[in-house]
Image: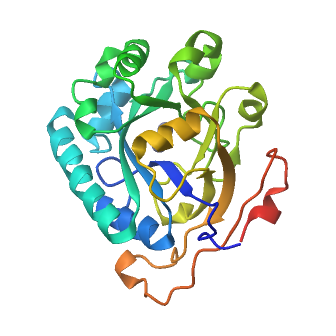
Amino acid sequence: MAWSDEDMSLADLHVHSTFSDGKLSVRELVDWYGSAGVRTLGITDHWCDSVSPLGWFARALGRTLTRDSLQLYLDTLESEARRAKQRYGMTLVTGIEFTWNTLSNHRSAHIVVLSKESSELRGLNPNLGMEQLLNEAKQRELFTIAAHPLSTGRMEAQTYYLWDHRERLADQIDAWECATWDRRFEEVERSGLPIIANSDLHSKRQALAWRSSLEIGSHADVQDVFECIRAQALTPVHYELPGARYDSVAALSSTQSPLKLAPFRGPVDLPEQSLSV
Ligand SMILES: [Zn+2]
Ligand SMILES: [Zn+2]
């Protein structure tokens, strides 16, 4: 089945650029996803707190947004959103992955916050702490996603705080990631909490990843995307963006074969091999 089938509206709402620790610029991401036919892309760079030692370290390495880079980030996403719409008919959603890394996995959390207008994100910052940030986001009617709430299965720090406190926090989180990259969080799938699958893409190595297909029309705006996810009118899909073997998006030719993917309907229980392309 090709991506362009009328009932497929591919979305990936958790992707990183060079504004934090991603390898591709915002422009390269827009061109890659746009030319692959993805309809909704959320760029969500990390913003680490500057209080904890690990947050401070991320800042020293230039792997996080800061108060100083925030304005340029929001301006860049705003202008790229116009280009994405004009050139590809793709909706670019502005987001931030608020990031609290500590030495304890159970005190660490990543929260993706998405906005309709990038100006709505001004005034939020990770030094508020995760619970106050969730309160603020709720008051502003922003869209919140619990990022990779269970083990990613990789040699990296894990983020269990939101899952540990899910009963108390459920009202403040719009969706919980049930898959990122090649990892599924089956406990999330079974929990009854609202789900979303995103790539958490940082580089072209993650071209093949879990993402979501939303049941929305081609003229959907950001609000429609949020409402669609809140209504859970979506299906996790595992597919590959074309052209991953090229280092530069500029190397993609216009004759590139269209994106192929293997969507599935209903419960998330097919073996992964059958979903790969
Ligand atoms: Zn994360
Ligand atoms: Zn991420």
Q: Is residue 224 above or below residue 110?
A: below
Whether residue 1 sits left or right of residue 26 in the image: it is right
The residue closer to the viewer here, 52 or 34, is: 34
Looking at the rendered structure, the number of numbered marks drawn on it comes to 0
Quick one: 253 or 158, which is closer to the camera? 253
Residue at 26% from the left image edge and 59% from the top image edge: 82
Image location (x, y in percent) of residue 259:
59, 74
Depicted 68 relative to depicted 103: above or below:
below
Q: Where is the N terminus found, in terms of image quarters?
A: bottom right
At horizontal 39% and vertical 55% (from top left) the residue drawn is 91
x and y percent of residue 111 in the render? 46, 30
Q: What residue is drawn where x is 30% and y is 19%?
A: 127
Q: Is residue 118 above or below residue 108?
A: below
Name the spot of residue 156 as percent of width and height, x first: 56, 40
Q: Is residue 43 left or right of residue 147?
A: left
Residues 213 and 159: in front is 213
